Amino acid sequence: MPDQYLESLRTEDLRLAEQIKKTRDAIEVIRKQEIDAETKSQLDDKRSRIVGRISLYIESVDLGEDVNPLQERLDQLTPQIEELEEKLDPSTLKERLESQLSCIAEDMTLWARELGLEHSEHPIRLDASKLTVVAETPHGRTPLYRMGSGENWVGYHIVTYLALAKWFIEQERPVGRFIFFDQPTQVYFPSDQAITGDIKEISDDEDREAVKRMFEWIFKIVDQLSPNLQVIITDHADIDEEWFQSSIVDTKWRGDNALIPRNWYENELVGEAELYAHLKGLIQRCRDELNYNPSYFSKMLEQHGAIRSVTQLVLDKNISEGLTRLALEERLDLSVEAVVIEKPWSELFDDEVIKAAKLKLTST
């Protein structure tokens, strides 16, 4: 009997819970209806106020006033409005863009063939929707990333930029009349062998011819568009021919004549960040080479920074556990004391710290 009674209570509890849920849902629906009704009422009030203002304005207008000048002005503006609507029509804009890209594609295709680029036997065009170059083949569009080597990619980039420049010039569009190319021949020069930039450093005959052909072609296009286009090139290549040498407008950056002077990095200044990185490297070497983890110093480094941690450790009159361990391992070269007396790090510490470091190293 008690079990049956408990079961009946559970059943009743579930029933009441379901009724409560339904009641809450109904209340929520009513609240939403009230909010919607209030919102509608507010909108109706706003509409009524606007209608009232319009009515007041209409009543204040003198319909007897001569509106002929306004009608004449409206008649003048109507054709202009219709013309603008036609020009701004999305389908018209799309058709115009496709037509312009087709004109640009003619130059791109012709020039790609002059440079001997892969896939240039097919029409080449700029896909504006994906901002890439494509080849229109019988099997569909081939995008630039599937067009072969780095040499090919560089060639198509140059062709595209110059084709766009030509179009902007011919259409007298307000676009800058210069292009800057940085190291277009980088794909040809072996980084471990290139020194003078002479194309003779390129081992492959075809690559040498490709470099020369690319520069000759750029010169030809600039000459055709002169004086409306300037092409600025910074490159490693140095072709020993008059037409190329006469175009060099600055000192050749070789050896000491460089964009970044040698003394900038040979006399490099060091600071907190460089010291921190150096110390982190020494900590890792202790772990790798000695199976020793200088955890105490690692914590100091993170809490106080590089210079303060080293200074505090070196000036401590007591010999640290870490220095003792490194001395036993005969690896004092990994100690912070060795760092303090070593250039360029010694420039970061005063004489007191350097003196203390030397004393600890000689007495350990």
Image: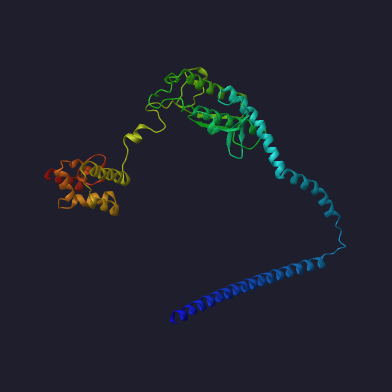
| Observer able to see residue 355 | no
Residue 291 vertical placement versus 33 (above, below)? above
136 on left or right of 15:
right
Total marks shown come to 0
Quadrant containing the C terminus is: top left
Q: Residue furthest left?
A: 363
- Left or right side of 5 for 103: right
Name the spot of residue 245 as percent of width and height, x first: 49, 20
Side of 237 where 168 appears, left or right: right
Would residue 288 be visible to someone looking at this image?
A: yes
- Color theme of the render: rainbow
**Foreground pick, 194 / 60:** 194
Q: Tell me residue 64's x, y (percent).
A: 88, 62
Closer to the camera in the image, 122 or 358:
122
Q: Give the percent coordinates (x, y) of residue 231.
A: 55, 29
Could you tell me which residue is drawn at 17 percent across and 47 percent down? 323
Query: Whole-percent x and y of residue 322?
Result: 18, 48
Residue at the far front: name it: 1
The residue furthest right is: 64
Query: Residue 282's image quarter?
Result: top left
| Along the line of sight, the residue nearer the viewer: 349 or 11 | 11
> Looking at the figure, which quarter contains the N terminus?
bottom left
Residue 100 quadrant: top right
Residue 45, above or below 153: below
